[in-house]
Image: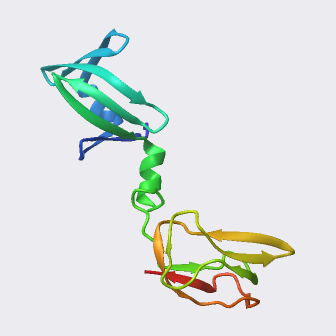
Amino acid sequence: MKKSTSLAVDIEGKRYDLADTHWEHFDCIQVSPDTYHLLENGNTHVIKVIAADAAHKKFTFKIDGEIKEASVMNGLDLLIEKMGLNSAQAKRLQTMNAPMPGLVTGIKITEGQQVEKGTPLMILEAMKMENLIVAPHDAVIKSVHVTLGQAVEKGAPLLEFS
């Protein structure tokens, strides 16, 4: 028995989950480099590709005269989404924890400070290497839980975002 692979297509906010078995209801032929004729359950559609960003899986189509924005998620994308690891579903971090044991050798922020994604927050020295801890997203620093020169264990709270 063949395992069914999944595919999801989001067309302007409406999601269509498709499995291999759904494709038997479609008859599609390419009539030019950017135009397709689709026969689906007796209904015909003309689809013209206006723009395609294959790297980001985003497409703009003209379907039966209407322009539609679409994005595609393959089986791996769907698994990442299900695990809650995709950026679209990523929750904003409330507490930044130490990724490793080390010594706090630099604190570059203060409570109440607005930071952007990638802003240096602090330096954690581990095994004679300085590791720059950066903001994972835009946020405001609610509180700093460590002091300069403090030793921390892996997983220890470093700061909180509001």
Closer to us: 162 or 115? 115
Extreme-right residue of the structure = 128
Quadrant location, the C terminus: bottom left
Report which quarter residue 21 is drawn in.
top left
Q: Is residue 125 left or right of residue 48?
A: right
The residue that appears at 52% across and 85% down in the rendered structure is 111
Query: Image height check: is 140 above or below 47?
Result: below
Quadrant location, the N terminus: top left
Task: List x then y, in percent, for residue 105.
Answer: 76, 81
Query: Image height check: is 104 above or below 51?
Result: below
Q: Is residue 139 left or right of residue 145?
A: left
Task: List x then y, in percent, for residue 54.
Answer: 46, 31
Query: Image height check: is 49 above or below 146?
Result: above
The residue that appears at 39% across and 61% down in the rendered structure is 89
Report which quarter residue 6 is drawn in.
top left
The residue that appears at 44% across and 70% down in the rendered structure is 92
Report which quarter residue 91 is drawn in.
bottom left
Q: Is residue 150 left or right of residue 144?
A: right
Extreme-left residue of the structure = 42
Closer to us: 104 or 127? 104
